[in-house]
Image (cartoon, rainbow, N blue to C red):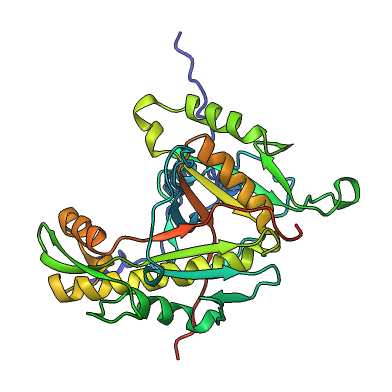
């Protein structure tokens, strides 16, 4: 005797699915993490000598305890910092006010002039993180601009529009992010 | 001729809802796949600073997070910025161990791509951040990411 099994009512299936859907809608986080990428230097080797860098090759940026900027011992402004950095890191031939330039031969680009300039960033323990990030941001913007310039000149498109890995590497080599963060000293209040 | 007239029905046929569950299930699966459940409960407040030159942090499985900020329960823990690792408060000396454990948890081939994301409250003083950075250097976790929100720039 074959008995008929009554069909299960599937009408409420949509409701169940809706319930689950709403749960996942609520718990889901779509935000992407964004931030400024930086590479830390390895810890200093005590036996290693401090490299001798000429005064003209360094741009000193000091962020004070009260979030004020000192650029080469003069009062600086966060609004002009980007242009100051671009100006400092651009190529200036035979100008003692700017860092030295050297000729470098890089694959895919050929011979380019690169600067020996270094940005030295120093902050106090009392500097606020907000200010520090603002300065890092301006530095990142300045280097991006420099890379864009070279990239436009050599490959005809902006740095972040480059697709070829080799080209990106070449630009990275020609315009490295030379930001040196000074070893912290215990000065100032927390 | 009247034969044809009979066939014209005046009622609009009901829309079939039998495929509704399928559509909902499709949405459901989409959200199930894309969802990322929050792993840690924040016990410090991290109101991130804003910046314009931000990069996307890719491969979330290769990121370990360090939170720094004032405790949410300021009545119990005070308002001084503290470090949070996983679900607990930590001190500076815990960071090296944390990095080692994070590294152990990853596949050997992926270890060199491990990034440390610093989620630091904007009001926090740099002192504690510098200490954390020094510890990360000692633990040779060199790739760091200062977590920031993307600033919306008004076009002029």
Question: How far from the left and from the top, in percent, is residue B105?
Answer: 49, 26
Q: Nearer the viewer, residue B124 or B35?
A: B124
Q: Residue at x 32, y 67 (%)?
A: B8
Q: Residue at x 40, y 26 (%)?
A: B107
Question: How far from the left and from the top, in percent, is residue A28?
Answer: 55, 49
Q: Quadrant of the C terminus of chain B?
A: bottom left
Q: Nearer the viewer, residue B37 or A88?
A: A88
Q: Nearer the viewer, residue A58 or B9?
A: A58
Question: How far from the left and from the top, in percent, is residue A153?
Answer: 16, 76
Whether residue A14 is visible to the viewer of this picture, yes or no, is yes
Q: Determine which quarter of the picture holds residue B136.
A: top right
Question: How far from the left and from the top, in percent, is residue A93?
Answer: 22, 79
Please give left or right for residue B101 compared with residue B25 in the image.
right
Q: Quadrant of the N terminus of chain B?
A: bottom left
Whether residue A15 is visible to the viewer of this picture, yes or no, is no
Q: Nearer the viewer, residue A97 or B19?
A: A97
Please give left or right for residue A79 compared with residue A159 in the image.
right
Q: Determine which quarter of the picture holds residue B7.
A: bottom left
Q: Residue at x 61, y 45 (%)?
A: B132
Residue lying furthest right in this view? B75
């Amino acid at each position: 005797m074959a008995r008929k099994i009554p069909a299960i009512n599937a009408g409420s299936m949509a409701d169940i699915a809706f319930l689950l859907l709403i749960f996942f809608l609520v718990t889901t986080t779509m935000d992407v993490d964004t931030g400024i990428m930086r590479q830390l230097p390895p810890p200093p080797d005590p036996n290693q000598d401090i490299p001798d860098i000429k005064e003209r090759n360094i741009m000193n940026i000091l962020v004070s305890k009260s979030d004020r900027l000192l650029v080469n011992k003069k009062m600086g402004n966060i609004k002009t910092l980007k242009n100051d950095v671009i100006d400092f890191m651009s190529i200036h031939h035979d100008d003692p006010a700017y860092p030295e330039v050297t000729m470098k031969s890089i694959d895919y680009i050929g011979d380019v002039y690169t600067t020996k300039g270094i940005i030295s960033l120093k902050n106090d323990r009392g500097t606020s993180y907000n200010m520090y990030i603002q300065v890092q941001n301006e530095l990142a913007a300045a280097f991006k601009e420099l890379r864009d310039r070279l990239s436009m000149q050599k490959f005809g498109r902006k740095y972040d529009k480059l697709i070829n890995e080799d080209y990106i590497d070449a630009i990275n080599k020609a315009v490295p992010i030379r930001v040196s963060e000074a070893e912290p000293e215990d000065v100032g209040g927390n | 001729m009247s034969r044809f007239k009979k066939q014209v029905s005046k009622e609009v046929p009901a829309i079939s809802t039998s495929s509704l569950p399928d559509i909902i299930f499709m949405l459901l699966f989409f959200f199930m796949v894309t969802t990322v459940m929050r792993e840690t409960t924040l016990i410090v407040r991290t109101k991130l600073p804003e910046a314009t030159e931000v990069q996307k942090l890719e491969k979330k499985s290769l990121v370990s997070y360090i939170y720094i900020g004032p405790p949410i329960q300021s009545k119990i823990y005070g308002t001084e910025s503290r470090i949070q690792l996983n679900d607990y408060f930590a001190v500076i000396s815990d960071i090296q161990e944390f990095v080692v454990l994070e590294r152990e948890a990853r596949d050997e081939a992926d270890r060199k791509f491990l990034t440390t994301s610093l989620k630091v409250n904007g009001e926090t003083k740099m002192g504690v951040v510098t200490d954390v950075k020094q510890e990360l250097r000692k633990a040779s976790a060199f790739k760091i990411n200062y977590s920031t929100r993307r600033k919306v720039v008004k076009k002029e």
